[in-house]
Amino acid sequence: MADNSQKMSYHVGEAKGQAQEKASNMMDKASDTAQSAKESMQEAGQQMKAKAQGAADAVKDATGMNK
């Protein structure tokens, strides 16, 4: 009887460890995804800023204000 109880405790502990590992892996993936999204947004923001600056410079050139 004690043998079965020990086996059950072992398997419960093993399952708990596997669940914790899976949860940790999921959190890591979520963190990586969030970081990637942040970097993409920053890059998009920089591109928009550069385009806006280019448009402003073009307007200044066209109106003669860039002298």
Image (cartoon, rainbow, N blue to C red):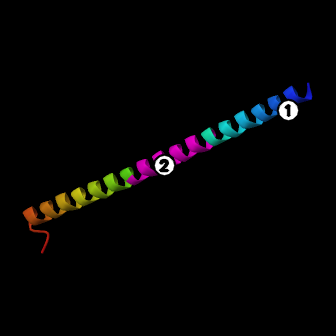
In the image: residue 34, left or right of residue 64: right
Identify which amino acid the numbered label 1 is placed on: Gln
Q: Residue furthest bottom?
A: 67
In the image, 9 versus 52, the foreground residue is 9
In the image: residue 30, left or right of residue 21: left
N-terminal of the pair, mark 2 or mark 1, is 1
**Residue shown at 71% from the left, 33% from the top:** 15
In the image: residue 11, left or right of residue 43: right
Kindly state the secondary structure of the residue where label 1 is placed. helix
Which mark is on residue 32? 2
- Residue holding disc 1: 6
Identify which amino acid the numbered label 2 is placed on: Asp
Q: Quadrant of the C terminus?
A: bottom left
**Residue shown at 81% from the left, 31% from the top:** 7
Kindly state the secondary structure of the residue where label 2 is placed. helix
In the image, the segment drawn in magenta is 23-39
Q: Residue furthest top?
A: 1
**Residue shown at 46% from the left, 51% from the top:** 35
Q: Residue furthest right?
A: 2
Does 7 appear in magenta? no
Q: Quadrant of the N terminus?
A: top right
**Residue shown at 70% from the left, 40% from the top:** 17
Counting from the top left corner in percent of width and height, residue 36 is at 42, 50
Quarter where residue 11 is shown: top right
Counting from the top left corner in percent of width and height, residue 28 is at 55, 47
In the image, 44 versus 29, the foreground residue is 29
Foreground mark, 2 or 1, reads 1
